[in-house]
Image (tube, helix red, strand yellow):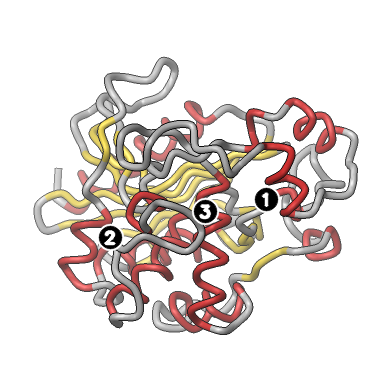
Amino acid sequence: MLFSLVSNGSPSAGEQPDVVVPWWSFTKTLLAAAALTLVRDGVIDLDEVLPEGPFTLRQLLRHEAGLADYGELADYHAAVARNDAPWSADEMLQRLDAGRLRYGPGTGWGYSNVGYLYVSRLITRLCDLSLEQALIQRVFAPLGLSNVSLATTPQALKNVRMGSAAAYHPGWVYHGLLVGSLKDAALCLERLMTGELLGPSLRNQMQTAYPLGGPIAGRPWIAPGYGLGLMQGPVRGGRVLSGHTGSGPGSVVAVHHCTEHENTATCAVFLEDADQGIVEAHVVSHLAAALETAAGR
C-alpha cells in the first residue's frame, strides 16, 4: 500500500508518497474544480442549459443529467482487456447511443463518465486551451502544484505505477486521466477544500450532495452522496468525508478530506489489484489517526 497524509495543511506522513500513480476518477474532482472557477469568474452559470444537451453544468457535475455510462458496454471492457487502441470519442458515443437520455435531467441519478467528457469539452471550449493547459491555469498553478500531468498516450504512463495494467492506454478514459504523486493528490484536495480557489459559497455547493441511500456493502460509507465532483458523506466512525475514489485496470486510488473542529486532514491511498472498500478503509483509518493526534487524543 502507498499513501500520503496531509494534516492541517502540511504533509505529515506517507509511504513512497512521490511515486507517480494514475488518479483515475479523482480526475473528476479536478475537472469539477476547473469548471467551478469558470462559474466563479462569471463565464458560465451552474444552472444554465448547455449546448451539449438539455442539462446544466450542475447536473453534469452531480451525475444528474440523464446520461448513460460507457462502463455499461461489454464491448468496452473486452476491448480494454485486449489492449486494443481506444475508440474515438465519437465512436464511443455512437456505440452507447449517448444522445438518448436515460431519464429526465434533474429527475434521477446515474454515475456517468460521459457527463465528465462533456465537462472536459466545456472547459477546453470556454478556456480556448487544451485540457491540460486549462487545468494547470485554473487549478494546479493556483494551488501550487507543478508535477501533475494529463496522460494521453501509453508512453505517458511509462513511469507510472499501473499494477497489472502496464499496457493500458489512457485514451480509454474519455474525460482525461491525470497522473501524479499521492503527495500532490492529497495536497491538491486539502488546498481545494480549505483554500480560496473557489471561495466559501462555491465550495459549499460543491459539497452539497445528492443522497444515494444507505450503507454500501464492503465499503465504509454509511450514507453516501455525490456533490459537484465529490463523493460526500459520513463513514463508519462518524466522520464526514469529501473526495473521490477511482479505479481502473490494475489499481485503485482514494483521495479524501475530513474537517473536525479546527483540524483538517486529507489522505491519498493507492493499492494495486485491490477493491475500493479496502482502499477506502485505509483512508478512514489514516484520517482518524491524524485527527485524533491533532486533537491531542
**Nearer to the camera, 149 or 291:** 149
Categorize mark 2 by other alpha carbons within 10 Å: few (<14), some (14-19), many (20+): few
Q: Earlier in the sequence, mark 1 or mark 3?
A: 3
Tell me if residue 130 comes above or below residue 191 in the rendering: below
**Nearer to the camera, 152 or 267:** 152
CA separation in Å, label 2 and label 1:
26 Å
Residue at left offset 61%, top offset 61%: 178
Tell me if residue 1 can be seen: no
List x then y, in percent, for residue 252: 59, 39
Residue at which label 2 appears:
47
Residue at left offset 49%, top offset 60%: 185
Q: For residue 100, which quarter of the picture?
A: top right
* Residue type marked 1: Val
Q: Secondary structure beneath disc 3? A: helix
Tag of residue 173: 1
Q: Earlier in the sequence, mark 2 or mark 3?
A: 2
* Residue type marked 2: Asp
Residue at which label 3 appears:
116
Which of the two discs, 2 and 1, sits closer to the camera? Answer: 2
- Residue reaching furthest left? 261
List x then y, in percent, for residue 281: 42, 30
Query: Which image quarter is the N terminus in?
Result: top right
Q: Secondary structure beneath disc 1? A: loop
* Residue type marked 3: Tyr
CA separation in Å, label 2 and label 3:
16 Å
Residue at left offset 51%, top offset 68%: 122
Which of the two discs, 1 and 3, sits closer to the camera? Answer: 3
